Image (cartoon, grey):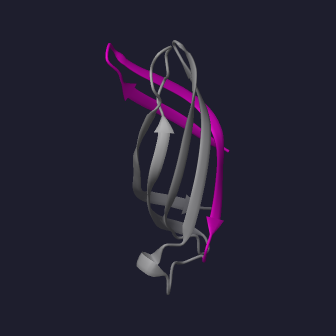
Amino acid sequence: MKADVALVSGHDLPQGGSGGGFKGSYFFNRNGERAFMSISVLNIEASYLATSGGGAISLEATIGHDSTVGRGIGFLWLIGISRGGFPREGDRALIFPAVKIGFHVDL
């Protein structure tokens, strides 16, 4: 399970939303050793975001490296594609690249 906060600028005013969803990960291996560009994980994420104009569904698929060996601080990088936005009547859904770089703590 995951929590999300998003801000997307539209034609009139910026719109934002917050909500929650699910994330599924498939690990090719746990540390990325002996893998092309150390790719170790495929992530699929879906979230429902409550907005001032109703709600929206955000979908994302990424592939990259997420170290999960033991406890401690790990590093991640992911690239992929995202479908989101806050569709109003007549608007098209936004499709854009997704890039994530960061650290996480394994307890």
Q: Is residue 27 magenta?
A: yes
Query: In the rendered view, would you say 36 is above or below 77?
Result: below
Residue displayed at 56% across by 67% down: 41
96 relative to 47 in the view: left or right? left
Residue displayed at 48% across by 24% down: 86
Residue displayed at 63% across by 34% down: 20
**Can you give x and y, in whole percent of width and height, for residue 105 in the image?**
54, 60
User: Residue 9 falls in which quadrant of the image?
Assistant: top left
Residue displayed at 39% across by 52% down: 99
Query: In the rendered view, would you say 84 is above or below 27?
Result: above
**Can you give x and y, in whole percent of width and height, for residue 2 in the image?**
62, 43
Query: In the rendered view, would you say 65 is above or below 24?
Result: below
Name the quadrant of the N terminus.
Answer: top right
Q: Which residues are magenta?
A: 1-29
Query: In the rendered view, would you say 63 is above or below 17?
Result: below
Count of numbered marks: 0
Q: Residue furthest bottom?
A: 34
User: Residue 43 falls in which quadrant of the image?
Assistant: bottom right
Name the quadrant of the C terminus.
Answer: bottom right
**Can you give x and y, in whole percent of width and height, for residue 45 in the image?**
60, 47
**Can you give x and y, in whole percent of width and height, for residue 50 in the image?**
58, 22
User: Residue 101 falls in which quadrant of the image?
Assistant: bottom left
Viewer-side residue, 3 vs 13: 13
Secondary structure, magenta segment, majority class: strand
16 relative to 57 in the view: left or right? left
